Amino acid sequence: MSLTWTCHICGIERDDADIGVHQTDISELRGFAKGTILHNVRYCLDNERCVRAAQSYSHFARPERCEIFVFGSNLAGRHGKGAALAAACEHGAIYGVGEGRQGNSYAIPTKDRMLRPLELAAIRVYVERFLAYAREHPELRFRLTAVGCGLAGYTPFWIAPMFAGAPPNCALPHEFTEVLRKGK
């Protein structure tokens, strides 16, 4: 049996030889002597996105400074393409988790476990959960992608109105703001 590790960036389990560790000394930030607390981030050696993201990834992000990347997901949490892949590689999204806050990202399901697009009514429920979360966390800033308008196949005309009541800490994508502006 070989030793394996899970990449902190993409969430894939890999053999020991395929995983690197980016190490940062955070001792002085925590009030300790230099060299006593090390922040280790495991990453895939053969994935350039994981290598780059490991340099800035933090298990200790300060929420008061967080910008949360909001992306469309599937209920299986397979973050393999589009904005979901960017969320996994660069914002702490966890493979296998299809909804909610993960690292500096938030997944809104737009596809089911079999990767088929969800009905608009189902997406609306997940959007409402997200908006409730955003209202509960005014200290965070949420940067939305055009959720549901990529791999799920919907257009902003169908999805943008779901975000019409978004709180001010949500930055909607241009595609959504255009639809909402025209709708007034």
Image: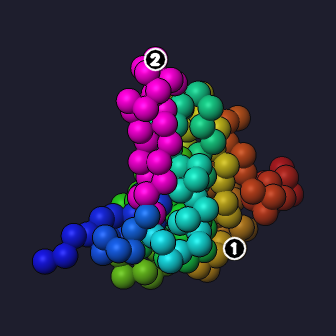
Q: Nearer the viewer, mark 2 or mark 1?
A: 2
* Residue at figure coordinates x 33%, y 64% from the top left: 6
Amino acid under disc 2 = Gly
Element carrying mark 1: loop
Q: Position of residue 131 (x, y in %)?
A: 55, 43
Q: Is 149 situated left or right of 115 in this image? A: right
Residue type indicated by callout 1 = Thr
Foreground residue among 32 and 110: 32
Q: Report whether residue 152 is seen.
A: no
Q: Local crowd at mark 2 within 10 Å, few (<14), some, or many (≥20)? A: few
Residue span colored magenta = 21-43
Q: Nearer the viewer, residue 76 or 19?
A: 19
Residue beneath label 1, please?
A: 155
Q: Residues within 10 Å of mark 1 (few under 14, many from 20)?
A: some
Residue 109 point in image, percent of width and height = 46, 64
Q: Give the residue pinned by disc 2.
A: 31
Report the coloring of the rendering.
rainbow
Q: Which sits in the foreground, 68 or 10?
A: 10
Pinpoint residue 88: horizontal percent, then vertical percent: 50, 63
Task: Specify whether 110 is left or right of 78.
Answer: right
Q: Earlier in the sequence, mark 2 or mark 1?
A: 2
